[in-house]
Image (tube, helix red, strand yellow):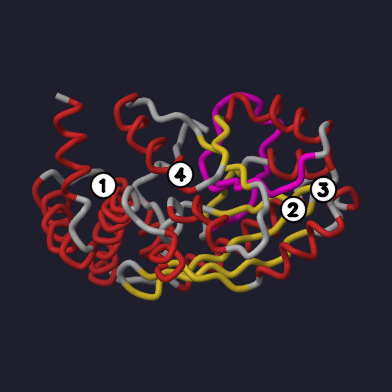
Amino acid sequence: MFWIFYAFLWLLMWLPLPLLYPLSDFCALLMYHVLRYRRKLVRRNLTQSFPEKSLKEIKRLEWRVYRNFVDVMIESMYSIHMSKKEIKRRLTYSGKEVLDEALAKKQAAFIMTAHNGNYEWLTGAKLSFEKDYNYFTIYRALSNKHFDKIMMDVRQRRHNVNIEMHDLMRKLDENHNNGVTGFYGMIADQKPSRKNPQHWHWTTFLHQDTPFLTGTEFLARKYDYAVLYARMSKLGRGRYHCHLEMLCDEPTLTSPGEITEKYARMLEQDLMAAPEAWLWTHNRWRKDL
């Protein structure tokens, strides 16, 4: 059954992207009004994050959240067949010189990003850069092995190296000791696991006490790698822009939590400007943390 679905999906994604958006709208309507997928969670997240908004405003925002959520899924699947030319047209970059400067001084760099905009298309960043840097994408394997297989097939077409989270330390040590240069893409807005709460960084984020993972800053200090922030904005359906900014160029001189705090503030700024682009279906403020 999975292979039948995969074959159907593979064929469907040959359609031009504009022709797939009516399907995206239908799926969003189904998910929002019929299946009511995580409606209570999304409502709670939005209400607590934007207390100044009325219920009417929250409901309008909810619909934009679900529409964006399905758009990102469709666009991610569509990229199975995307050419280098098309992905460069649909996802533009600025601030690439910041990465060039960082890698001229350091062996490697971390680029911190979030589940904001089309974060899956960021895995094709190497295709848009003039210099042939090694690009390592850090990911967490999905619980559904079939969907994980689809996503891995999509990502492996983008000329980056995928590293599963559990293998990250071993691969980093190996690359560092062998003098491998390049950059590592780190999505850092997930809720932390219940393990090792002493390594969390607590801050006020979107009006709520929020724990953040500190893994990226720990690794940046350990290896003395620069840290950049990928500020992604949605220009329209199927069109995005990513601006690279230096977050920290001397991590060994920072205090614990400093890099993570700056990341939280930069992400919060993005979400206040365009809240519908974030993954609000994620249980970010789980009460048992």
N-terminal of the pair, mark 4 or mark 1, is 1
Does dot 4 land on a helix, a strand or a loop? Answer: loop
Instruction: Give the residue pinned by disc 4.
Output: 284
Which numbered disc flags the more N-terminal residue, 3 or 2?
3
Label 1, secondary structure: give it: helix
In the image, what residue type sits under mark 1?
A: Lys
Quadrant location, the N terminus: top left
Q: Does the magenta stretch include residue 169?
A: no
User: Which of pointers 1 and 2 lies earlier in the amino acid sequence?
Assistant: 1
Any mark on residue 259, and which?
A: 2
184 in magenta: yes
Q: Earlier in the sequence, mark 4 or mark 3?
A: 3
Which residue is painted at 53% across and 58% down in the image?
A: 127
Residue 271: percent from left, percent from top: 48, 65
| Amino acid type assigned to the residue bearing label 3 in the image | Gln
Q: Give the range drawn in magenta.
A: 180-205
Describe the element under mark 2 as helix, strand or loop. helix
